């Protein structure tokens, strides 16, 4: 019975981990790559890729909306940032530097 409870708890917490590599964006972000900007991201369990920036996620990233520190590289520079990512079904809420954006998983 205890094992069943732990298994159910693990299933309920699935929004914390992202096992796949997926593209998320707003309406224009899910359009052709030529029209994409930072409103289109590729998200995996190890990195978040923007138009000209890639941020490496911590070894155990938290996709529940809690703040996490990431190391970013782009246009010849490197910096750290504090972001939060919250996954709810096919929607990712991204927050950084007071900016919040809700992005939907793009069709494959």
Image: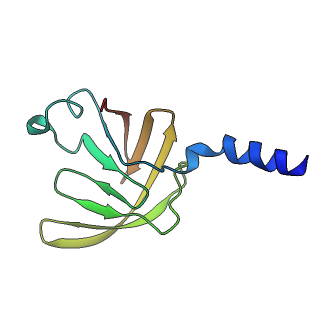
Residue lying farthest right?
A: 1
Q: Position of residue 18 (x, y in %)?
A: 48, 49
* Nearest to the observer: residue 20 or residue 49: 20
Work out which quarter of the rendered image holds the C terminus and state it. Answer: top left
Compare residues 32 and 86 and report the one nearer the observer: 32
Relative to 81, is 8 on the left or the right? Answer: right
Percent x, y of residue 93: 43, 40
Q: Residue at x 46, y 49 (%)?
A: 85
Given residues 38 and 4, the one toward you in this image is: 4
Q: Judge whether 75 appears above or below 84 on screen.
A: below
Point 53% across, 48% down: residue: 65
Q: Residue at x 50, y 60 (%)?
A: 61
Q: Would residue 34 be found to the left or right of residue 102 on screen?
A: left
How many numbered dots are placed on residues in this image?
0
Where is 81 relative to 11, above or below?
below
Type of colouring: rainbow
Residue 4 sits in which quadrant? top right
Q: Residue at x 48, y 50 (%)?
A: 19
Outermost left residue: 34
Image coords of residue 29 (percent x, y): 22, 34
Question: Along the line of sight, which residue is nearer the eye, 9 or 38?
Answer: 9
Residue 39 appears in which quarter of the rendering? top left
Q: Residue furthest top?
A: 27
């Amino acid at each position: 019975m205890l094992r069943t409870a732990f298994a159910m708890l693990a299933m309920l917490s699935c929004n914390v981990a992202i096992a796949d590599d997926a593209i998320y964006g707003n309406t224009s972000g899910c359009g052709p790559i030529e029209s994409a900007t930072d409103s289109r991201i590729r998200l995996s369990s190890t990195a978040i890729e923007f138009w000209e920036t890639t941020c490496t996620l911590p070894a155990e990233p938290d996709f529940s909306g809690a703040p996490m520190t990431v190391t970013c590289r782009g246009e010849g520079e490197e910096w750290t940032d504090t972001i939060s990512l919250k996954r709810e079904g096919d929607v990712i809420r991204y927050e950084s530097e007071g900016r919040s954006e809700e992005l939907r998983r793009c069709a494959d």
